[in-house]
Image (cartoon, rainbow, N blue to C red):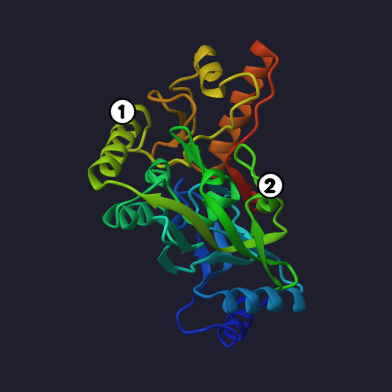
Amino acid sequence: MNIEKVSKELEKCISKDSKIYENELMSKHTSFKVGGPADIFVIAATQYDVKNILNYSVKNEIPLTVIGNGSNLLVKDGGVRGIVLKIGIDEFYIAENPDKEYIITVGAGVKNGYVAQKLLIDEIEGFEFAAGIPGSIGGAIRMNAGAHSGEMKDIVLETKCMDLDGNIKVLSNAEQKFEYRNSIFSTNKYIVLSTKLKLKHGIYREIKGKMDEYTKWRKEHQPLEYPSAGSTFKRGKDFITAKLIDECGLKGYNIGGAEVSTKHAGFVINKGNAKAKDILNLTRYISEKIYEKFGKKIELEVQVIGEDLEN
């Protein structure tokens, strides 16, 4: 693929609000702060740009990888071939009905923290659980993000998405097939464009109180001072993975620059100089040790993309 040629052709397909970068290091766009270069990295500001990029990639048989804010993503050291498309749609609307319920329309590129702060100002409750979840709305919908006994499935009314043929669809809550850290969007057959949340009127001090409480909890229990992708592994059906990792004595265990957090065993962190290879080798080691000791197979919550670096 001629990167410069493709980049120039893509520029003609998108609006001025969208951005294109060549040979862009994915370490700049992931919370793990690791990852090799994407041949072409595009931030799409509108659904029309998303469609044009999708059509271009199909027509020219160029691989297309769609990402959100990169907070639940591990990109391998060799980077990603083809086009990496980051959804940057940032619409945000609040509509109130007579029953003091609110329908919040949020673009897939809007960060969860921003949504929480806007809703706090307008005294709208129900999103507090997601205030401290890193990343954007699109990623939160895709993985049915949750914390503090709340999940996205509890508040999503409907989601607008695009299939791989460029057709727009609006899926109801039920059609999104929400499960624990999973949804219909995990199959990569649909691209989340925006969602509508159904929330209700609250009291400012109570909303802020919950958000402050959750923020304090996160600071006390999670290694926020180091780059990571949040919880590295999913919970099992009948076990808590972090507890098993702890019982294996793996807190503080490291490979290269990757380490099992001493504060929370469920977090693999980047101590500052980790490579994606280190993180992956550490997750494999953890999986092997847990299977040896408990006979349990554990599953990554983090999405892994890209290619290994050639020696």
Instruction: Please give the residue where the numbered disc 2 appears in the rendered image.
Output: 177
User: Against 226, is 83 above or below?
Assistant: below
Categorize mark 2 by other alpha carbons within 10 Å: few (<14), some (14-19), many (20+). Answer: some
Q: Which mark is residue 118?
A: none
| Quarter occupied by the N terminus | bottom right
Where, by quadrant of the figure, is residue 172 drawn? bottom right
Label 1 secondary element:
helix
x and y, in percent, of residue 102 in the image: 43, 58
Q: Residue at x 55, y 84 (%)?
A: 11
x and y, in percent, of residue 299 in the image: 65, 32
| Label 1 vs 2, first from the N-terminus | 2
x and y, in percent, of residue 143 in the image: 58, 46
Categorize mark 1 by other alpha carbons within 10 Å: few (<14), some (14-19), many (20+). Answer: few
User: Against 110, is 141 above or below?
Assistant: above
Type of residue at label 1?
A: Glu
Q: Residue at x 43, y 22 (%)?
A: 252
User: Against 220, is 141 above or below?
Assistant: below
Label 2 secondary element:
loop
Q: Is residue 35 visible?
A: no
